[in-house]
Image: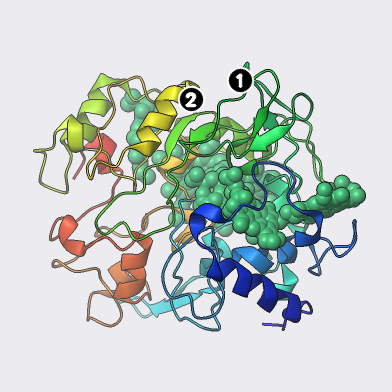
Amino acid sequence: MRIPRSCAFVLLVFSHVVASTASDEVFHNGGTGNCTGCHTTPPQLRGSDAGSTCLICHQAPLGVALPSKYFIATDVGSFSICVQLPPAGDFCWLKKTYKWSTSRGATEFSRGERHGHNIVAIDFGYEADSTHSFSPGGNYPSSSLTCISCHDPHGNYRRRADGSIGTSGPPVVASGSYPDSPDPTASASVGTYRLLCGRGYQPNSLPGTPPMASDPPAAIAPRVFNRSENAYATRVAYGSGMSEWCSNCHAQLNSSHSHPSGASAVLSEGIASNYNSYVRSGDLSGQRERSYNSMVPYELNTRDYAVLKSIAASADLKQSGPAGKENVMCLSCHRAHASGWDASTRWNMQSTYLVYEGTYPGTDNGAPVEYSLGRLSSEIQQTFYDRRATDFATFQRSLCNKCHLRD
Ligand code: HEC
Ligand code: HEC
Ligand code: HEC
Ligand code: HEC
Ligand code: HEC
Ligand code: HEC
């Protein structure tokens, strides 16, 4: 990795950021943060490119060994494992290539660049995808893909009192991503969910990018969203519009990728009842009041922020599952940034068993290579957001079964 040219600044920001607590840390505040956080003098950025500027604050500083705050990248120079556990995933997986020999002697790979969105951030060693030139099913050039392809750096997109989204209207007064975010009024707007960009957005500095056609999704995240899920699930209340937003760049995925997704992909009472009864392979004793699993999220099919806020604010250890009006979305199977698996999927889609003989399979515990796929068992545990293998069956099959009961 290259040494960031803004190293001195990095250390300054880090010491500030680490010293303060989560609640008093405000930077974007749903809108335009302090210019000097990102610019030396506008429009000159602090990093070599936009992505490197974001990672000055969003890659966890050396020595941060646990998931925390708003970190969405681990410095692989300091840890062999990707540490951060935000819902969107840790970009560090893009730097992890796995290689193994099958029982028939063939060599197989799971390349780092297959593990998610290859954001350009050269100061931090992130480069454009070398195999997909454009977004699959779309025409977004991979050479221009970076944080500001999806997030508006100036937070100009806002949610207004009538629920509509745009770049004009009352000023942004706060983040719109949390249960305690204020409701927008006639004189004050809030930021879009996670500062995601909306209709018409086209970054000036990224050539050849098509303008966005769909607005960001309705969703609310819990205040503490980056943590081990060993004891508590981190439940983002996804409301509506995620698949439609992803389709800004992936509108025409081909027939080999035909799973229904989006507002019309309603779970149905049958599928909701599967979801609620499924605990693990072979155990269908679940109850709706405790059946939610953040490994297999769905959208609530609503833009009612009162509902989303109350769900994301819930401190219950176990949360309730679907009634049958909810819908499948891209993030039912994928993570938005990156994951430990090919195509940024939430779990291993290539092996029969996710848990084998009661443990996460790994190159370190003698599990068959067709289940470990070159990973350490601790890395696989991390892809399950630190859940214990014993939360699953001794021989656990794919989580597609949470909705389809085919195991
Ligand atoms: C979170 C980081 C961030 C903050 C905070 C920020 N900027 Fe920017 N700014 C960027 C990035 C990234 C670009 C490149 C945007 C693009 O290519 O569309 C940019 C571009 C610009 C440009 C060039 C024109 C344009 O929009 O592309 C101007 C002017 C500018 N910023 C001014 C400001 C001012 C003034 C502030 C403070 C009120 C500010 N910025 C705060 C990240 C930031
Ligand atoms: C100077 C440090 C700093 C820089 C540079 C920075 N961020 Fe942040 N970011 C923060 C902090 C602190 C938070 C949490 C508090 C907040 O949202 O104001 C945050 C939160 C966020 C969130 C969640 C906001 C919400 O309301 O849900 C997103 C998304 C984000 N940053 C994206 C970016 C992107 C994209 C860039 C680069 C264009 C960037 N950040 C640059 C410090 C920074
Ligand atoms: C601004 C454009 C843009 C948006 C929005 C976008 N993507 Fe992508 N996506 C791309 C590009 C470009 C690639 C190809 C480059 C790469 O794989 O790094 C890609 C690749 C992918 C891949 C393949 C990754 C791999 O390495 O095989 C998946 C899966 C994916 N996107 C899912 C999503 C999901 C889910 C969403 C919504 C949360 C989404 N995308 C939103 C531009 C976008
Ligand atoms: C392809 C689009 C895309 C790109 C590229 C992207 N993000 Fe995100 N980001 C998202 C989405 C969608 C979410 C919300 C995920 C969720 O709630 O499951 C998100 C969430 C976040 C969050 C909140 C934490 C979380 O996991 O929800 C931060 C902070 C953030 N992004 C920063 C960044 C930074 C910094 C970069 C570049 C290094 C970046 N993002 C690149 C789409 C993107
Ligand atoms: C039911 C689960 C599921 C849903 C829902 C889903 N996907 Fe996928 N997706 C997959 C699987 C499985 C793969 C292949 C994974 C692999 O290669 O190991 C994949 C692959 C991809 C790829 C890579 C294709 C390539 O040519 O490399 C993209 C891009 C993608 N999905 C985007 C999306 C988007 C965008 C949505 C929402 C509109 C979505 N997916 C919804 C399961 C899903
Ligand atoms: C969150 C719930 C959910 C998850 C997880 C899920 N599905 Fe589905 N699946 C659905 C729904 C809803 C439909 C729509 C048809 C229906 O009602 O049966 C569907 C339909 C299908 C179909 C029929 C295809 C069609 O076009 O109608 C197949 C095959 C399928 N799913 C396979 C998978 C596989 C493989 C996975 C894991 C990679 C998966 N599903 C994960 C909910 C889910």
**Which circle's residue, 1 or 2, is located before the other in the chain?**
1
Label 1: how many Cα within 10 Å (few below 14, some 14–19, many 20+): some
Image coords of residue 386 (percent x, y): 31, 63
Residue closest to the eye, 37 or 113:
37
Q: Provide the residue designation for mark 1.
A: 163
User: Compared with residue 362, is residue 334 higher up or lower down, i.e. above or below?
Assistant: above
Locate residue 127 relative to residue 368 in the image: left or right.
right
**Quarter residue 13 falls in:** bottom right
| In this picture, residue 59 sits left or right of residue 284 | right
The residue that mark 2 highlights is 305
Instruction: Where is residue 215? Give x, y as percent.
Output: 66, 29
Q: Is residue 327 left or right of residue 233?
A: right
Residues marked 1 and 2 touching at CB (< 8 Å): yes
Q: Amino acid at mark 2?
A: Tyr
* Residue 403 appears anywhere in the view: yes
Q: Is residue 204 above or below residue 6?
A: above
| Residue toward you, 164 or 274 | 164
Name which residue lies at 36% across and 32% down. Answer: 311
Task: Find numbered disc 2 in the image and state the secondary structure of the residue it sits on.
Answer: helix
In the rendered image, is residue 299 in sight? Answer: no
- When asked about the image quadrant of residue 328, the answer is top left
Determine the residue positioned at 59% across, 67% down.
17
